[in-house]
Amino acid sequence: MLNILTMKKNLFFVALILFVACAPQQAKAVTFDPTVRYSQEVINARMTSWKNKDSRVGFPNDNSTNGSTTPGTAASWDYVPGVVAKGILDVWEYYQDSTWADAWYQGLSSWALGKTAKNTGGSLDDLNCTKVFFGVYDGCKTGGKFENSTNADYCMTQMGRGADGLEAHNANYSISGTSSTADGGWYHKSSYGNQMWCDGAYMGPALLAQLLAYGVSTTLTWADVMTQFTSSWGGLWDEDKKLLWHCFSTDKSSGGASGWVYAPDQPKIGGGYHSAEYWGRANGWYIMALVDVLEAMDKAGKTGDADYLIIKGYLEKLAAGLVARQDATSGCWYQLLQYDDSKCATHGVDATGSSTYKNSNPQCNYLESSGSCLITAALLKGTRLGYFNQAEAGKKGYEGIIANFLSGSAGSYQLTSSCQSAGLGSDRNGSAAYYLIGKDVPIQNDSEGKVLGPFLMAAVEYERAYGPAAAEPCGCIKITVE
Protein backbone atom coordinates (compact mmCIF):
# COMPACT_ATOMS: atom_id res chain seq x y z
CA MET A 1 0.00 0.00 0.00
CA LEU A 2 2.84 2.37 0.89
CA ASN A 3 4.52 1.67 -2.43
CA ILE A 4 1.31 2.47 -4.31
CA LEU A 5 0.93 5.75 -2.42
CA THR A 6 4.57 6.60 -3.08
CA MET A 7 4.15 5.84 -6.78
CA LYS A 8 1.02 8.03 -6.96
CA LYS A 9 2.84 10.81 -5.17
CA ASN A 10 5.77 10.56 -7.56
CA LEU A 11 3.45 10.52 -10.57
CA PHE A 12 1.71 13.62 -9.22
CA PHE A 13 4.99 15.52 -8.99
CA VAL A 14 6.01 14.36 -12.48
CA ALA A 15 2.69 15.58 -13.84
CA LEU A 16 3.08 18.85 -12.01
CA ILE A 17 6.56 19.35 -13.45
CA LEU A 18 5.28 18.59 -16.95
CA PHE A 19 2.37 20.99 -16.49
CA VAL A 20 4.66 23.80 -15.39
CA ALA A 21 7.08 23.08 -18.22
CA CYS A 22 4.30 23.03 -20.84
CA ALA A 23 2.21 25.91 -19.50
CA PRO A 24 2.45 29.20 -21.43
CA GLN A 25 5.26 31.22 -19.94
CA GLN A 26 5.00 34.95 -19.36
CA ALA A 27 7.80 36.87 -21.06
CA LYS A 28 10.34 38.18 -18.62
CA ALA A 29 9.95 41.86 -17.84
CA VAL A 30 12.82 44.18 -18.73
CA THR A 31 14.81 45.99 -16.08
CA PHE A 32 15.18 49.58 -17.21
CA ASP A 33 18.74 50.36 -18.31
CA PRO A 34 19.39 54.05 -19.03
CA THR A 35 22.27 53.15 -21.37
CA VAL A 36 20.11 51.17 -23.80
CA ARG A 37 18.65 52.92 -26.83
CA TYR A 38 15.28 51.20 -26.71
CA SER A 39 13.97 53.01 -29.79
CA GLN A 40 16.61 51.33 -31.95
CA GLU A 41 16.19 47.97 -30.24
CA VAL A 42 12.42 47.89 -30.66
CA ILE A 43 12.44 49.05 -34.28
CA ASN A 44 15.01 46.42 -35.22
CA ALA A 45 12.99 43.74 -33.44
CA ARG A 46 9.52 44.81 -34.60
CA MET A 47 9.64 46.81 -37.83
CA THR A 48 8.85 43.79 -39.98
CA SER A 49 6.55 42.05 -37.49
CA TRP A 50 3.83 43.59 -35.33
CA LYS A 51 0.08 43.33 -34.88
CA ASN A 52 -2.73 45.39 -36.37
CA LYS A 53 -5.53 43.96 -34.23
CA ASP A 54 -5.40 40.24 -35.09
CA SER A 55 -3.28 40.51 -38.26
CA ARG A 56 0.50 40.19 -38.25
CA VAL A 57 1.93 42.88 -40.51
CA GLY A 58 5.18 44.74 -41.07
CA PHE A 59 7.21 47.23 -43.07
CA PRO A 60 10.26 46.57 -45.28
CA ASN A 61 13.57 46.79 -43.42
CA ASP A 62 16.97 45.99 -44.87
CA ASN A 63 18.77 46.48 -41.58
CA SER A 64 21.04 43.50 -41.00
CA THR A 65 20.55 43.82 -37.24
CA ASN A 66 16.87 42.96 -37.64
CA GLY A 67 17.04 39.51 -36.21
CA SER A 68 14.73 36.80 -35.09
CA THR A 69 11.17 37.88 -35.88
CA THR A 70 9.12 36.33 -38.67
CA PRO A 71 8.01 39.10 -41.04
CA GLY A 72 4.32 39.89 -41.27
CA THR A 73 2.38 40.67 -44.44
CA ALA A 74 2.73 44.14 -45.93
CA ALA A 75 0.96 46.74 -43.77
CA SER A 76 -2.20 48.23 -45.22
CA TRP A 77 -2.82 51.96 -45.60
CA ASP A 78 -4.80 52.89 -42.50
CA TYR A 79 -4.32 54.85 -39.31
CA VAL A 80 -2.66 52.09 -37.26
CA PRO A 81 0.22 51.47 -39.69
CA GLY A 82 0.34 55.24 -40.13
CA VAL A 83 0.93 55.74 -36.40
CA VAL A 84 3.66 53.08 -36.37
CA ALA A 85 5.31 54.57 -39.45
CA LYS A 86 5.25 58.03 -37.88
CA GLY A 87 6.91 56.68 -34.74
CA ILE A 88 9.68 55.07 -36.78
CA LEU A 89 10.17 58.20 -38.87
CA ASP A 90 10.37 60.33 -35.71
CA VAL A 91 13.21 58.12 -34.49
CA TRP A 92 14.93 58.18 -37.89
CA GLU A 93 14.71 61.99 -38.04
CA TYR A 94 16.61 62.26 -34.77
CA TYR A 95 19.24 59.65 -35.63
CA GLN A 96 19.51 60.26 -39.38
CA ASP A 97 23.18 61.18 -39.15
CA SER A 98 23.84 57.54 -38.25
CA THR A 99 23.91 55.22 -41.25
CA TRP A 100 22.35 52.37 -39.26
CA ALA A 101 19.05 54.29 -39.18
CA ASP A 102 18.84 54.72 -42.95
CA ALA A 103 17.27 51.31 -43.58
CA TRP A 104 14.21 52.42 -41.63
CA TYR A 105 13.67 55.45 -43.85
CA GLN A 106 14.35 53.49 -47.01
CA GLY A 107 11.90 50.77 -46.01
CA LEU A 108 9.17 53.20 -45.05
CA SER A 109 9.63 55.44 -48.09
CA SER A 110 9.40 52.41 -50.40
CA TRP A 111 6.14 51.51 -48.64
CA ALA A 112 4.64 55.01 -48.57
CA LEU A 113 5.63 56.05 -52.11
CA GLY A 114 3.48 53.24 -53.41
CA LYS A 115 0.42 54.46 -51.52
CA THR A 116 -2.25 57.06 -52.20
CA ALA A 117 -3.68 59.24 -49.48
CA LYS A 118 -7.45 59.25 -49.11
CA ASN A 119 -9.05 62.41 -50.48
CA THR A 120 -12.66 61.93 -49.36
CA GLY A 121 -14.32 62.54 -46.02
CA GLY A 122 -16.28 60.20 -43.80
CA SER A 123 -13.58 58.98 -41.42
CA LEU A 124 -10.92 61.05 -39.66
CA ASP A 125 -9.11 57.79 -38.87
CA ASP A 126 -8.65 57.10 -42.59
CA LEU A 127 -7.19 60.54 -43.22
CA ASN A 128 -4.61 60.40 -40.43
CA CYS A 129 -2.25 58.16 -42.38
CA THR A 130 -1.46 61.21 -44.55
CA LYS A 131 0.98 62.20 -41.77
CA VAL A 132 3.44 59.57 -43.03
CA PHE A 133 4.19 61.80 -46.00
CA PHE A 134 5.57 64.57 -43.75
CA GLY A 135 8.42 62.38 -42.55
CA VAL A 136 9.12 60.90 -45.98
CA TYR A 137 9.05 64.39 -47.52
CA ASP A 138 11.56 65.70 -44.99
CA GLY A 139 14.00 63.01 -46.11
CA CYS A 140 13.65 63.56 -49.86
CA LYS A 141 13.08 67.33 -50.15
CA THR A 142 15.82 69.63 -51.47
CA GLY A 143 18.70 69.33 -49.05
CA GLY A 144 17.28 66.20 -47.43
CA LYS A 145 19.43 63.15 -46.80
CA PHE A 146 17.63 61.23 -49.57
CA GLU A 147 17.04 64.23 -51.83
CA ASN A 148 14.81 63.28 -54.74
CA SER A 149 12.58 65.90 -56.35
CA THR A 150 10.24 63.34 -57.88
CA ASN A 151 9.59 61.70 -54.53
CA ALA A 152 9.25 65.08 -52.83
CA ASP A 153 6.65 66.16 -55.38
CA TYR A 154 4.78 62.89 -54.88
CA CYS A 155 4.67 63.48 -51.11
CA MET A 156 3.32 66.99 -51.63
CA THR A 157 0.65 65.67 -53.97
CA GLN A 158 -0.45 63.16 -51.37
CA MET A 159 -0.52 65.82 -48.66
CA GLY A 160 -2.82 67.76 -50.97
CA ARG A 161 -5.09 64.75 -51.26
CA GLY A 162 -5.24 64.56 -47.47
CA ALA A 163 -6.22 68.24 -47.38
CA ASP A 164 -8.94 67.51 -49.93
CA GLY A 165 -10.23 64.76 -47.65
CA LEU A 166 -10.43 67.15 -44.70
CA GLU A 167 -12.25 69.71 -46.84
CA ALA A 168 -14.79 67.06 -47.86
CA HIS A 169 -15.21 65.95 -44.27
CA ASN A 170 -15.71 69.54 -43.12
CA ALA A 171 -18.36 70.11 -45.79
CA ASN A 172 -20.36 66.96 -45.11
CA TYR A 173 -19.74 65.76 -41.55
CA SER A 174 -19.84 68.76 -39.24
CA ILE A 175 -22.17 69.43 -36.32
CA SER A 176 -24.64 72.21 -37.09
CA GLY A 177 -27.81 73.81 -35.79
CA THR A 178 -27.26 73.09 -32.09
CA SER A 179 -26.68 76.68 -30.95
CA SER A 180 -23.74 75.42 -28.91
CA THR A 181 -19.98 75.69 -28.93
CA ALA A 182 -19.95 72.31 -30.67
CA ASP A 183 -21.23 73.75 -33.95
CA GLY A 184 -18.67 73.23 -36.69
CA GLY A 185 -17.07 70.27 -34.93
CA TRP A 186 -16.22 67.30 -37.11
CA TYR A 187 -17.95 63.95 -36.63
CA HIS A 188 -15.39 61.30 -35.81
CA LYS A 189 -16.89 59.18 -38.60
CA SER A 190 -19.93 59.57 -40.83
CA SER A 191 -21.63 56.74 -38.93
CA TYR A 192 -21.28 58.66 -35.65
CA GLY A 193 -23.45 61.66 -36.48
CA ASN A 194 -23.14 64.67 -34.16
CA GLN A 195 -20.42 62.95 -32.14
CA MET A 196 -16.89 64.17 -31.39
CA TRP A 197 -14.31 61.80 -29.90
CA CYS A 198 -10.99 62.52 -28.19
CA ASP A 199 -9.32 60.36 -30.83
CA GLY A 200 -10.55 62.65 -33.61
CA ALA A 201 -8.47 65.57 -32.34
CA TYR A 202 -5.31 63.69 -33.26
CA MET A 203 -6.66 62.26 -36.52
CA GLY A 204 -8.23 65.45 -37.94
CA PRO A 205 -7.31 68.97 -36.75
CA ALA A 206 -3.76 67.97 -35.77
CA LEU A 207 -3.31 66.75 -39.35
CA LEU A 208 -4.75 70.01 -40.70
CA ALA A 209 -2.34 72.05 -38.57
CA GLN A 210 0.63 70.14 -39.97
CA LEU A 211 -0.64 70.52 -43.55
CA LEU A 212 -0.91 74.29 -43.04
CA ALA A 213 2.56 74.42 -41.50
CA TYR A 214 3.97 72.60 -44.54
CA GLY A 215 2.34 75.13 -46.87
CA VAL A 216 -0.13 72.70 -48.45
CA SER A 217 -2.81 74.52 -50.43
CA THR A 218 -6.28 74.18 -48.90
CA THR A 219 -9.44 76.21 -48.38
CA LEU A 220 -9.28 75.31 -44.69
CA THR A 221 -7.47 77.66 -42.32
CA TRP A 222 -6.05 77.93 -38.82
CA ALA A 223 -9.51 79.12 -37.74
CA ASP A 224 -10.82 75.67 -38.73
CA VAL A 225 -8.17 74.04 -36.57
CA MET A 226 -9.28 76.18 -33.67
CA THR A 227 -12.96 75.42 -34.22
CA GLN A 228 -12.27 71.72 -33.79
CA PHE A 229 -10.56 72.23 -30.45
CA THR A 230 -13.03 74.70 -29.01
CA SER A 231 -15.85 72.38 -30.09
CA SER A 232 -14.31 69.22 -28.68
CA TRP A 233 -12.87 70.74 -25.51
CA GLY A 234 -16.19 72.33 -24.63
CA GLY A 235 -17.99 69.01 -24.78
CA LEU A 236 -15.29 66.66 -23.47
CA TRP A 237 -13.56 68.46 -20.61
CA ASP A 238 -14.73 67.61 -17.10
CA GLU A 239 -13.64 70.45 -14.86
CA ASP A 240 -14.32 68.36 -11.76
CA LYS A 241 -12.18 65.33 -12.70
CA LYS A 242 -9.68 67.35 -14.78
CA LEU A 243 -9.96 64.71 -17.50
CA LEU A 244 -11.67 64.30 -20.88
CA TRP A 245 -14.64 62.06 -21.49
CA HIS A 246 -14.07 59.80 -24.48
CA CYS A 247 -16.94 61.21 -26.53
CA PHE A 248 -19.97 63.48 -26.61
CA SER A 249 -23.07 63.76 -28.78
CA THR A 250 -25.24 66.81 -29.40
CA ASP A 251 -28.22 64.56 -30.20
CA LYS A 252 -30.82 65.36 -27.54
CA SER A 253 -33.19 62.57 -28.52
CA SER A 254 -31.00 59.48 -28.41
CA GLY A 255 -27.45 60.52 -27.73
CA GLY A 256 -25.07 57.67 -28.34
CA ALA A 257 -25.64 54.34 -26.65
CA SER A 258 -27.27 53.23 -23.42
CA GLY A 259 -24.97 54.03 -20.54
CA TRP A 260 -24.12 57.51 -21.79
CA VAL A 261 -24.75 60.44 -19.47
CA TYR A 262 -27.56 62.82 -20.35
CA ALA A 263 -26.42 66.39 -19.84
CA PRO A 264 -29.46 68.65 -20.31
CA ASP A 265 -27.72 71.49 -18.51
CA GLN A 266 -24.58 71.27 -20.60
CA PRO A 267 -24.96 74.12 -23.11
CA LYS A 268 -21.58 73.47 -24.67
CA ILE A 269 -22.97 70.33 -26.29
CA GLY A 270 -26.51 71.62 -26.78
CA GLY A 271 -27.90 69.64 -23.88
CA GLY A 272 -26.89 66.28 -25.35
CA TYR A 273 -24.98 63.30 -23.98
CA HIS A 274 -21.42 62.40 -23.11
CA SER A 275 -19.86 59.00 -22.51
CA ALA A 276 -19.45 57.93 -18.91
CA GLU A 277 -15.74 57.17 -18.63
CA TYR A 278 -12.26 58.65 -19.08
CA TRP A 279 -10.32 56.25 -21.27
CA GLY A 280 -6.54 56.48 -20.98
CA ARG A 281 -5.71 56.14 -24.69
CA ALA A 282 -8.40 58.65 -25.69
CA ASN A 283 -6.89 61.25 -23.35
CA GLY A 284 -3.48 60.29 -24.74
CA TRP A 285 -4.55 61.00 -28.33
CA TYR A 286 -5.91 64.39 -27.30
CA ILE A 287 -2.87 65.59 -25.36
CA MET A 288 -0.59 64.45 -28.19
CA ALA A 289 -2.78 66.39 -30.64
CA LEU A 290 -2.44 69.56 -28.57
CA VAL A 291 1.36 69.28 -28.50
CA ASP A 292 1.55 68.60 -32.24
CA VAL A 293 -0.72 71.54 -33.06
CA LEU A 294 1.38 73.93 -30.99
CA GLU A 295 4.50 72.60 -32.72
CA ALA A 296 2.87 73.27 -36.11
CA MET A 297 1.88 76.76 -35.02
CA ASP A 298 5.47 77.37 -33.94
CA LYS A 299 6.65 76.30 -37.39
CA ALA A 300 4.11 78.59 -39.06
CA GLY A 301 5.05 81.59 -36.91
CA LYS A 302 1.68 81.67 -35.10
CA THR A 303 3.01 81.90 -31.55
CA GLY A 304 1.66 85.42 -31.05
CA ASP A 305 -1.91 84.46 -31.91
CA ALA A 306 -4.61 84.41 -29.25
CA ASP A 307 -5.56 80.92 -30.41
CA TYR A 308 -2.06 79.70 -29.61
CA LEU A 309 -2.50 80.73 -26.00
CA ILE A 310 -5.91 79.04 -25.83
CA ILE A 311 -4.50 75.74 -27.12
CA LYS A 312 -1.58 76.07 -24.72
CA GLY A 313 -4.04 76.61 -21.87
CA TYR A 314 -5.91 73.43 -22.79
CA LEU A 315 -2.62 71.57 -22.85
CA GLU A 316 -1.52 72.81 -19.45
CA LYS A 317 -4.84 71.87 -17.85
CA LEU A 318 -4.95 68.39 -19.38
CA ALA A 319 -1.29 67.70 -18.57
CA ALA A 320 -1.88 68.64 -14.93
CA GLY A 321 -4.97 66.42 -14.78
CA LEU A 322 -3.13 63.45 -16.26
CA VAL A 323 -0.05 63.86 -14.07
CA ALA A 324 -2.37 63.84 -11.06
CA ARG A 325 -3.60 60.41 -12.24
CA GLN A 326 -0.13 58.94 -12.81
CA ASP A 327 0.29 55.78 -10.74
CA ALA A 328 2.83 56.62 -8.05
CA THR A 329 4.40 53.15 -7.97
CA SER A 330 4.71 52.27 -11.66
CA GLY A 331 4.79 55.70 -13.25
CA CYS A 332 2.17 54.52 -15.77
CA TRP A 333 -1.53 55.16 -16.32
CA TYR A 334 -4.58 52.92 -15.98
CA GLN A 335 -6.96 51.86 -18.73
CA LEU A 336 -9.69 53.84 -16.94
CA LEU A 337 -8.08 56.93 -15.52
CA GLN A 338 -10.37 57.67 -12.60
CA TYR A 339 -9.87 54.27 -10.91
CA ASP A 340 -7.08 52.06 -9.66
CA ASP A 341 -7.04 48.25 -9.92
CA SER A 342 -9.72 47.87 -7.25
CA LYS A 343 -12.27 48.65 -9.99
CA CYS A 344 -13.29 45.35 -11.57
CA ALA A 345 -15.97 44.10 -13.95
CA THR A 346 -17.59 40.66 -13.92
CA HIS A 347 -19.68 39.19 -16.69
CA GLY A 348 -23.15 38.48 -15.36
CA VAL A 349 -22.89 41.11 -12.64
CA ASP A 350 -21.74 44.34 -14.24
CA ALA A 351 -22.67 43.13 -17.72
CA THR A 352 -25.71 40.91 -17.29
CA GLY A 353 -26.67 38.94 -20.36
CA SER A 354 -25.38 41.33 -23.00
CA SER A 355 -23.55 40.22 -26.15
CA THR A 356 -21.48 43.39 -25.78
CA TYR A 357 -19.36 41.62 -23.19
CA LYS A 358 -16.99 38.69 -23.25
CA ASN A 359 -17.90 35.51 -21.44
CA SER A 360 -14.67 35.43 -19.53
CA ASN A 361 -13.15 35.77 -16.12
CA PRO A 362 -13.47 39.03 -14.22
CA GLN A 363 -11.14 41.77 -15.40
CA CYS A 364 -9.92 44.51 -13.11
CA ASN A 365 -8.66 47.90 -14.20
CA TYR A 366 -5.06 47.57 -15.32
CA LEU A 367 -2.00 49.63 -16.20
CA GLU A 368 -2.36 50.07 -19.96
CA SER A 369 0.56 50.59 -22.30
CA SER A 370 -0.74 52.56 -25.32
CA GLY A 371 -2.28 55.33 -23.25
CA SER A 372 0.79 55.44 -21.01
CA CYS A 373 3.05 55.80 -24.06
CA LEU A 374 0.98 58.60 -25.61
CA ILE A 375 0.78 60.56 -22.37
CA THR A 376 4.50 60.10 -21.72
CA ALA A 377 5.43 61.14 -25.25
CA ALA A 378 3.30 64.28 -24.93
CA LEU A 379 4.75 65.20 -21.54
CA LEU A 380 8.34 64.79 -22.76
CA LYS A 381 7.77 66.51 -26.11
CA GLY A 382 5.79 69.36 -24.56
CA THR A 383 8.58 69.89 -22.05
CA ARG A 384 11.22 69.87 -24.80
CA LEU A 385 9.30 72.47 -26.80
CA GLY A 386 8.81 74.69 -23.77
CA TYR A 387 5.03 74.45 -23.34
CA PHE A 388 5.32 73.35 -19.69
CA ASN A 389 7.78 71.56 -17.44
CA GLN A 390 6.60 68.00 -16.88
CA ALA A 391 10.06 66.46 -17.20
CA GLU A 392 9.81 64.52 -13.94
CA ALA A 393 6.47 62.92 -14.81
CA GLY A 394 7.61 62.18 -18.37
CA LYS A 395 10.86 60.58 -17.25
CA LYS A 396 9.08 58.50 -14.63
CA GLY A 397 6.49 57.48 -17.20
CA TYR A 398 9.06 56.29 -19.72
CA GLU A 399 11.07 54.32 -17.21
CA GLY A 400 7.81 52.77 -16.01
CA ILE A 401 6.87 51.81 -19.57
CA ILE A 402 10.10 49.88 -19.98
CA ALA A 403 9.75 48.15 -16.62
CA ASN A 404 6.08 47.27 -17.00
CA PHE A 405 5.36 46.82 -20.70
CA LEU A 406 8.58 45.77 -22.47
CA SER A 407 9.48 42.10 -22.40
CA GLY A 408 11.98 39.82 -24.08
CA SER A 409 15.50 40.77 -25.09
CA ALA A 410 17.48 42.34 -27.93
CA GLY A 411 16.18 41.10 -31.28
CA SER A 412 12.87 39.91 -29.87
CA TYR A 413 11.41 42.70 -27.75
CA GLN A 414 7.62 42.74 -27.30
CA LEU A 415 5.31 45.48 -26.07
CA THR A 416 2.55 44.15 -23.85
CA SER A 417 -0.65 45.14 -22.03
CA SER A 418 -2.28 47.30 -24.69
CA CYS A 419 -6.02 47.58 -25.21
CA GLN A 420 -6.57 46.33 -28.74
CA SER A 421 -9.49 48.61 -29.51
CA ALA A 422 -12.46 50.41 -27.96
CA GLY A 423 -15.32 52.19 -29.62
CA LEU A 424 -18.59 53.88 -28.77
CA GLY A 425 -22.13 53.72 -30.03
CA SER A 426 -24.57 50.90 -30.71
CA ASP A 427 -23.97 48.19 -28.09
CA ARG A 428 -20.53 49.55 -27.17
CA ASN A 429 -21.88 51.68 -24.37
CA GLY A 430 -18.73 53.19 -22.91
CA SER A 431 -19.37 51.90 -19.39
CA ALA A 432 -16.50 50.82 -17.14
CA ALA A 433 -17.48 47.21 -17.79
CA TYR A 434 -17.24 47.78 -21.54
CA TYR A 435 -13.66 49.07 -21.35
CA LEU A 436 -12.64 46.12 -19.16
CA ILE A 437 -14.57 43.12 -20.53
CA GLY A 438 -16.05 44.36 -23.79
CA LYS A 439 -16.06 41.84 -26.60
CA ASP A 440 -13.75 44.01 -28.73
CA VAL A 441 -11.33 45.26 -26.05
CA PRO A 442 -8.95 42.35 -25.48
CA ILE A 443 -5.53 42.97 -23.97
CA GLN A 444 -2.77 42.55 -26.57
CA ASN A 445 0.68 41.31 -25.57
CA ASP A 446 2.13 41.12 -29.07
CA SER A 447 3.29 44.64 -29.97
CA GLU A 448 -0.02 45.87 -31.35
CA GLY A 449 0.43 48.93 -33.55
CA LYS A 450 -1.46 51.31 -31.29
CA VAL A 451 1.22 50.85 -28.64
CA LEU A 452 4.22 50.34 -30.95
CA GLY A 453 3.92 53.74 -32.64
CA PRO A 454 3.34 55.73 -29.42
CA PHE A 455 6.15 53.81 -27.68
CA LEU A 456 8.61 54.98 -30.34
CA MET A 457 7.35 58.56 -29.99
CA ALA A 458 7.97 58.36 -26.24
CA ALA A 459 11.33 56.62 -26.63
CA VAL A 460 12.81 59.19 -28.98
CA GLU A 461 11.65 62.04 -26.74
CA TYR A 462 13.32 60.39 -23.75
CA GLU A 463 16.49 59.87 -25.75
CA ARG A 464 16.45 63.49 -26.91
CA ALA A 465 16.27 64.60 -23.28
CA TYR A 466 18.65 62.13 -21.65
CA GLY A 467 20.83 60.72 -24.43
CA PRO A 468 23.32 62.03 -27.03
CA ALA A 469 22.27 63.78 -30.22
CA ALA A 470 24.02 61.27 -32.47
CA ALA A 471 24.67 57.55 -32.26
CA GLU A 472 27.93 55.68 -32.57
CA PRO A 473 28.84 54.97 -36.22
CA CYS A 474 29.11 51.27 -35.43
CA GLY A 475 25.40 51.10 -34.70
CA CYS A 476 26.01 50.02 -31.11
CA ILE A 477 22.98 49.81 -28.87
CA LYS A 478 24.62 51.07 -25.68
CA ILE A 479 24.71 54.81 -25.15
CA THR A 480 26.25 57.07 -22.56
CA VAL A 481 23.98 59.29 -20.52
CA GLU A 482 24.82 62.00 -18.04
Image (cartoon, grey):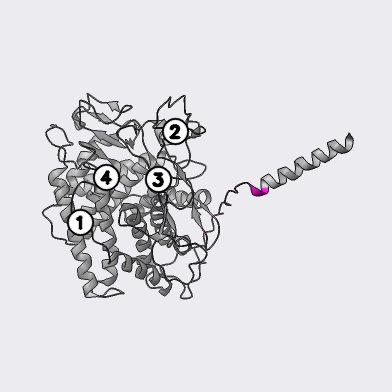
Mark sitting earlier along the chain (4/1): 1
| Amino acid at the residue labelled 2 | Tyr
Q: Is residue 114 above or below residue 316?
A: below
| Amino acid at the residue labelled 3 | Gly
Residue that badge 4 annotates: 200
Callout 4 touching callout 1 (CB < 8 Å): no
Q: Quadrant of residue 164?
A: bottom left
Callout 2 touching callout 3 (CB < 8 Å): no
Q: Measured from the top left, where is residue 32 in percent x and y?
A: 54, 55
| Amino acid at the residue labelled 4 | Gly
Whether 187 is among the magenta residues is no
Residue that badge 3 annotates: 371
Q: Which residues are magenta?
A: 21-36
Residue that badge 1 annotates: 162
Q: Secondary structure at mark 4?
A: helix
For the residues labelled 1 and 2, the Cα–Cα distance comes to 38 Å
Residue 293 in view here: no
- Please tell me which residue is depicted at 18% across the width and 64% down the height of the picture: 157
Callout 4 touching callout 3 (CB < 8 Å): no
Callout 4 touching callout 2 (CB < 8 Å): no
For the residues labelled 4 and 3, the Cα–Cα distance comes to 15 Å
271 and 472: which is toward the camera: 271
Q: Quadrant of residue 102?
A: bottom left
For the residues labelled 1 and 3, the Cα–Cα distance comes to 26 Å
Mark sitting earlier along the chain (1/3): 1
Q: Measured from the top left, where is residue 391 in percent x and y?
A: 41, 51
Q: Residue furthest right?
A: 2
Residue that badge 2 annotates: 339
Q: Secondary structure at mark 1?
A: helix
- Mark 4 or 2: the one toward you: 4
